[in-house]
Image (cartoon, rainbow, N blue to C red):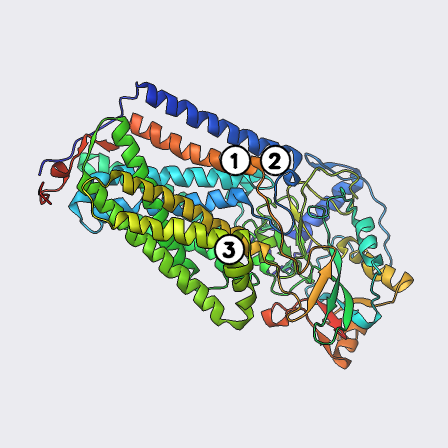
């Protein structure tokens, strides 16, 4: 097999510039939204003293979780030695960095005092899982940057498997850390489940791959580079497996929570009576984001492109729904101060907290996604991330045209 | 200056020193940080007041005991006193306005019997808010009072998620008319300070004071570590409860006849 050749995007088409402008505009709008919320204070958002993490956190957690998953494609190539995945590694690393940068930006801009970022970077409470996550995130950026360099620099190529392994282990830690943010909330019944960490890992595999597939397809189409059907079908099947894993851990999560009698209330809320959350759970996460994509990718066809693309979009939508249910739904359900009692207060004790995301919150979240897109687009323009050809015959020596 | 042995504040952070400095600055009317202006205050210094250059005593644990039988339904004198004392002016937006103390009415669905009681930060001995705070802005003083350092809070609101008692509020909008002894800050989190400024001056929290003077006398304040204190004796004699005792956080606020 010939060594894969990579090259930068030419980046002079109107499509490239159009996309660049669009992403730039969304990012600018997101920054504007953050400034607006900061200036007036968070009362202009849908958040309040009961729902303290709103839509920006849904976007941020989704992006951060997806970031570590996007690195999987690189890991499969270099850690698990699967040849067809090797040419995909560079782009996978780039997408991982971009998503993390996008997610973290949203997270920081939604702080009450984003201007105190320096405090967050210099004062650590080592008991706090949140503080640990700051290390995990920054370390991840460094590790993946190094990994990219080793993949790109010929002299360093022999270190790729080692760097890949470090990056792989780091990303597992990162996702576990993100999941544990919720696991540490002892009093929030919705999060009191030991499977939160594995669930988040499965989610990251699935969301990250979905985004990766879409980026790959768009980049190859935009840059007129060949992308083999067998490769797409293979990525699609992998996505199906990951989507199934998310469903599996979701079932385990709810079953273990149901098993604890004192959590029956929150489970009934999320799964049966929770209105929007129940709808998002069954309709958004389970059907649109789980069963449907699985049905799409596991059907054998000669032209898998459209199906896999659609499945990827559905996984992303379902994933957003899932994160929404976890974050907002988990907070909407009231804390139990007096088990077995009916309570009433001027501070909304005992009632389900309403939440409607406000426009600035959504725009800020989209701004984070746009930032991720910009990093990917400019990265591909400046450095050699994208292979010249991903035709099946070019990347897989065992590929037979008749397959 | 002696150093407090503060078991939960991060290393290098000395709340006593900080408080001392800010009080010294306050006396001179100095701007501590942009937007935080402290003015000279006249501090009542009764004989029992802790001298400002003396560390918070780790042998003391301040706490409260609330006799639910004496707390009247519909009375919210403690709530108003708290708002007045700490300058918690609302904006008519109950969902985002700060509430450090609230009255909860609880009804037993089986018997229909109902009770009314105030709930505020329970000043947990093992406070989850302090454990999760990434910057160490949430901290517990040596005398058991849990506070937020307004200068290092980044407003991440993780502590609000972690608190089992819904005791914390986030400052959602621009503030005016702040009290110099209880500085607040837009974009940061706050909760009941047990009127730390009063305690340090040898007085009792505003809610306790008003409840005893004008209402049912349901609230008692004192040192849980001192076996001879009134509050310790009451706890030793009568059955008392903690809200969500099952969580094992050892709150400093106890309830009687709940
Ligand atoms: S009641 Fe809440 S805010 Fe107060 S110390 Fe306990 S966990 Fe912290
Ligand atoms: S909001 Fe402030 S006090 Fe609360 S956890 Fe974040 S930094 Fe700490």
Q: Earlier in the sequence, mark 1 or mark 3?
A: 3
**Residue at the spot 29% in from the left edge and 47% down from the top edge:** A296
Q: Mark 2 — residue?
A: A37
* Mark 1: secondary structure: helix
Which of the two residues, A282 or B245, is positioned nearer the viewer here?
Answer: A282
Identify whether A145 is placed above or below B103.
Answer: above
Mark 1 chain = A
Q: Are marks 2 and 3 in contact (CB under 8 Å)?
A: no
Say which residue label 3 marks.
A278
- Along the viewing direction, whichever of A156 and A36 lies nearer the viewer: A36
Q: Residue at x 30, y 18 (%)?
A: A12
Mark in the foreground, 2 or 3: 3
**Residue A158 visible in image:** no
Q: Which residue is mark 1?
A: A364
Spatial separation of the CA atoms under disc 2 and disc 1 = 10 Å
Number of the front mark, 1 or 3? 3
Q: Is label 1's Cβ within 8 Å of ligand 2?
A: no
Distance in Å between CA atoms under marks 1 and 3: 25 Å
Q: Earlier in the sequence, mark 2 or mark 1?
A: 2
Chain identity of mark 3 = A
Do callouts 2 and 1 point to residues on the same chain?
Answer: yes
Frontmost residue, B254 versus A4: A4
- How many neighbours does mark 1 have within 10 angstroms: few (below 14), some (14-19), or many (20 or more)? many
Q: Decide: marks 2, 1 in contact (CB < 8 A)?
A: yes
Within 10 Å of disc 3 (Cα), the crowding (few <14, some 14-19, many 20+) is: some
């Amino acid at each position: 097999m010939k060594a894969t050749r990579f090259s930068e995007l030419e980046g002079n088409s109107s499509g490239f510039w159009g996309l660049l402008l669009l992403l730039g505009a969304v990012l600018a709008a997101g920054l504007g939204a953050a400034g607006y919320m900061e200036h007036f204070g968070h009362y202009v958002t849908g958040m309040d003293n009961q729902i303290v993490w709103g839509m920006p956190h849904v976007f941020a957690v989704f992006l951060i979780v997806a970031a570590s998953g996007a690195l999987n494609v690189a890991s499969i190539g270099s850690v698990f030695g699967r040849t067809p995945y090797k040419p995909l590694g560079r782009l996978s690393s780039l997408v991982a960095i971009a998503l993390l940068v996008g997610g973290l930006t949203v997270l920081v801009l939604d702080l009450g005092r984003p201007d105190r970022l320096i405090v967050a970077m210099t004062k650590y409470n080592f008991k706090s899982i949140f503080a640990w996550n700051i290390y995990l995130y920054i370390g991840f950026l460094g590790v993946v940057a190094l990994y990219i360099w080793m993949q790109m620099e010929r002299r360093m190529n022999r270190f790729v498997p080692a760097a890949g392994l470090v990056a792989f282990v780091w990303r597992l830690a990162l996702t576990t850390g993100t999941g544990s943010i919720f696991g540490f909330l002892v009093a929030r019944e919705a999060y009191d489940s030991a499977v939160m960490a594995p669930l988040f890992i499965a989610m990251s595999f699935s969301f990250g791959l979905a985004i990766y597939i879409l980026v790959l397809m768009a980049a190859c189409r935009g840059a007129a580079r060949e992308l083999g059907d067998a490769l797409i079908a293979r990525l699609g099947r992998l996505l199906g497996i990951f989507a199934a894993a998310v469903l599996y851990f979701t079932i385990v999560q709810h079953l273990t929570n149901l098993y604890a009698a004192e959590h029956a209330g929150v489970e009934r809320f999320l799964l049966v009576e929770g209105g929007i959350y129940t709808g998002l759970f069954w309709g958004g996460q389970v059907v649109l984001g789980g069963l449907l994509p699985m049905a799409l990718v596991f059907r054998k066809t000669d032209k898998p492109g459209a199906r896999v693309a659609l499945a990827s979009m559905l996984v992303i939508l379902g994933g957003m729904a899932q994160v929404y249910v976890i974050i907002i739904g988990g907070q909407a359900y009231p804390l139990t101060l007096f088990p077995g009692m009916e309570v009433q207060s001027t501070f909304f004790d005992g009632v389900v907290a309403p939440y409607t995301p406000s426009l600035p919150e959504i725009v800020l979240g989209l701004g984070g996604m746009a930032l991720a897109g910009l990093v990917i687009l400019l990265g591909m323009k400046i450095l050699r991330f994208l292979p010249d050809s991903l035709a099946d015959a070019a990347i897989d020596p065992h590929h037979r045209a008749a397959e | 200056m002696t150093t407090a042995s503060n078991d939960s504040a991060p290393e290098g952070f000395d709340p006593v020193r900080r408080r001392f400095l800010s009080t010294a600055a306050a006396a001179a009317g100095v701007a501590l940080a942009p937007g935080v202006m402290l003015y000279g205050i006249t501090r009542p210094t009764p004989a029992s007041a802790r001298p400002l250059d003396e560390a918070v005593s780790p042998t003391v644990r301040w706490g409260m005991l609330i006799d639910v039988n004496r707390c009247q339904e519909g009375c919210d004198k403690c709530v108003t006193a708290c708002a007045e004392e700490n300058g918690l002016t609302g904006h008519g937006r109950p969902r985002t306005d700060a509430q450090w103390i609230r009255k909860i009415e609880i009804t037993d669905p089986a018997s229909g019997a109902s009770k009314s009681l105030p709930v505020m930060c329970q000043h947990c001995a093992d406070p989850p808010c302090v454990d999760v705070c990434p910057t160490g802005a949430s901290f517990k003083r040596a005398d058991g009072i849990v506070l937020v350092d307004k200068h290092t809070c980044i407003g991440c609101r993780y502590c609000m998620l972690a608190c089992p008692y819904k005791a914390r509020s986030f400052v959602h909008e621009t503030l005016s008319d702040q009290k110099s002894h209880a500085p607040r800050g837009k974009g940061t989190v706050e909760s009941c300070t047990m009127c730390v400024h009063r305690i340090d001056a040898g007085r009792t929290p505003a809610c306790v004071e008003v409840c005893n003077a004008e209402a049912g006398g349901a609230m008692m304040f004192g040192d849980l570590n001192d076996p001879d204190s009134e509050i310790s004796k009451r706890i030793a004699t009568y059955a008392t409860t903690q809200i969500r005792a099952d969580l094992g956080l050892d709150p400093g606020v106890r309830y009687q006849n709940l």
